[in-house]
Structures are given as structure tokens and as C-alpha cells.
Amino acid sequence: MEAVDARAILARLGKEVASGRLIPYLGPDVLALSPEPSPVPVGARALSHMLAAKVAVPGRIRDNLWHSAQYIETFRHRVTLDRLMADIFRPIPNPGPLHTWLAGLPGVPVIVDTWYDGAMAKALAGRHDWGLVQGASKARRVDAAPWFRAYDSAGRDSAAMDWRTVLYKPHGAAAPAGDVLVSDADYVEVLSEIDIQNPIPPVVQDRRTGRGFLFLGCRFYDQILRTFARSILRRSGGPHYAVMPPGELTPNERKFLAAESILPLELPLAEAAVLLPGVEARA
């Protein structure tokens, strides 16, 4: 994809998001758009290194978040892992330009946010017509099959999920309950069911119908990340687009994008964001 073509397409896609035609799918790199440094780690490798700095893990797995988290869960107990994740993500980053833009679009039916931080929820805090639906960890289950948990805009448990905008965090969230999917054990059960869509909330399944996705700040270098994205896309309408850093895509990422009919727009995220109508440039 030529950069000039990517720019022209992005100018149109902002309107598609605003109208509810495209669902935004955010990765951790959107935090890097804020003018101040993020108070939480940005990306799986950075988080894995932070966990390893607090609890020693074997050097061979330090770069793998899910293996590192599993090592801590196995040898130091799940309570330790949950406490570390809560401590790391207790600071809430100030919303960046993409967060602020999306929060100001009441026509967006779903915002998928794949990181554990609370920046997107903080951006939505001025509204009362939204709620959070998040993936739930096996380690916290007490009943039959709560694959996900839901909270209203005030952080209260909710069963309705009929909000104007649903903030969907498939890997869990640090707030309000600190329930996250992060260890290998968390994903084993979820991935065994994800092909039949049980872990995907019905409200998300319903609202993706007839719509496409726009991936912003995401990478797909790991099988878990690709599997979740593939399952969330399933039975959606398309077309799909992904802003990706130029010249950095791995062969597996290119194969994934091609297999899922996701058009890569190869531009730096900061440059791409300001091409979306209504997004302000970083100060």
C-alpha cells in the first residue's frame, strides 16, 4: 500500500467510524500518542519485563508475557500475579487523541480495547450511556461459565448491556475489578472455546454484524493476539483496515492480514491518527 493511498483512505475512514460503520479496535500503542510518557507499560514485551523486574523469572521467557505470567502464577500463586497487575495498572493514563476522539462519537456502537489500562474508560467518563464488557479469568470463576463480566459507567455490575456504546476489553481490565487474562492458564480455556464464540459477549457478536473494523495501535506477532482478533472479526461485515508501522510487519502478520482480508495502511500511528477527521494532533 502506497503511503499516499493510505492517507487518502484514512481521511474517509474517520467518517466511517463516526457513523458506526467501522468498529475501532485499539492496541496498546495508542498510549504512545499522548504528549506525556505513559505511566503503564505499552505492549506485551514491556509488561513482561516489568513483571520480571518484580518477580524473577527465567531469562528464556522474559520476553514472553504469557509465559512470564504463568511462571509467577505457578511458583508465587495467582494472588501474587493479580496484585502485581493491579499495582502496575493502578495509574490511569491521561486519554490520548484517539481516546478523546472516540469518546466524543456517540454513534460508535463498540470500541474494542485490547490493553489492560483505563485510558479509554477515563475518556468516556463524562458520558452515562456506555458500559464495559471484559474478558474474565478462569482463576476468578466461581460459577459455571462467566466468560465475561459487565459494568455500567459507574463501575457497577450490570446484566443489561444495552448501552449506546460498549467498551469491550477482551483480555480483561485492571479496573474496576482487576480481572485480567494474562497467563497461559487463562488462555488455555478461553482458546478452547473461542472458535465456537462462547467467550465473545453476545452484545459484541450482535453489533459487529454488518460492520467492519479499523485496527489502531495493534500488532499481531503472537498467535494469541491473532486468534483473538480473528474470533472477534468472525461474522462481521467488513471491510477491515489496519494502521501498521511501515517496514516492520513480520511474515506471520502479513499472512494474518491477508487471510482475514484486512487491508494494511502502512503509516506511523501518530501520522495516521491526525488524518482521521476530528483527531487533534499531539501537542
Image (cartoon, helix red, strand yellow):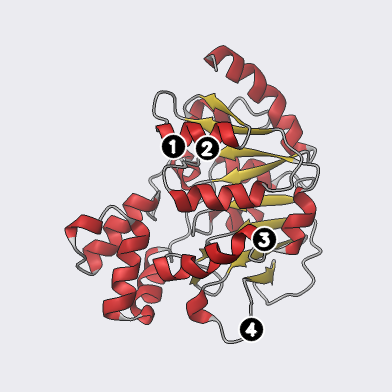
Q: CA distance from mark 2 to mark 3?
A: 19 Å
Picture quadrant where residue 26 is located: top right
Question: Alpha-carbon distance for marks 4 and 1?
Answer: 36 Å
**Number of residues whose C-alpha sits closer than 10 Å to that of mark 2, classed few (under 14), some (14–19) or many (20 or more):** some
Q: 65 above or below 150?
A: above
Given residues 188 and 58, the one toward you in this image is 188
Q: Which residue position holds label 2?
A: 256
**Rendered location of residue 41, percent (x, y):** 37, 53
At 38% from the left and 81% from the top, the residue drawn is 79
Going by the numbered disc 3, the residue's amino acid type is: Gln
In this rendering, would 191 be left or right of 250?
right
Residue 226 placement, left or right of 277: left
Q: Secondary structure at mark 3?
A: loop
Q: Are marks 2 and 4 in contact (CB under 8 Å)?
A: no
Q: Counting residues from the N terminus, which is met first, the one under dot 3 or under dot 1?
A: 3
Which mark sits nearer the N-terminus, 2 or 3?
3
Q: Which residue is mark 4?
A: 144
- If the image is split into quadrants, where does the N terminus sit? top right
Residue beneath disc 3 = 197
Q: Is residue 13 above or below residue 103?
A: above
Residue 203: give its label.
none
In the rendering, at what x and y percent does residue 8 appear? 65, 17
Residue at 71% across, 51% down? 110
- The CA distance from mark 1 to mark 2 is 6 Å
Amino acid type for the residue under numbered disc 1: Asn
Q: Earlier in the sequence, mark 4 or mark 3?
A: 4
Provide the secondary structure element on which disc 1 rests: helix
How far apart are labels 4 and 3 at the CA level? 16 Å
Q: Which residue is mark 1?
A: 252
Q: Secondary structure at mark 2?
A: helix
Say if mark 1 contacts mark 2, CB within 8 Å: yes
Residue at image position (77%, 40%) is 237
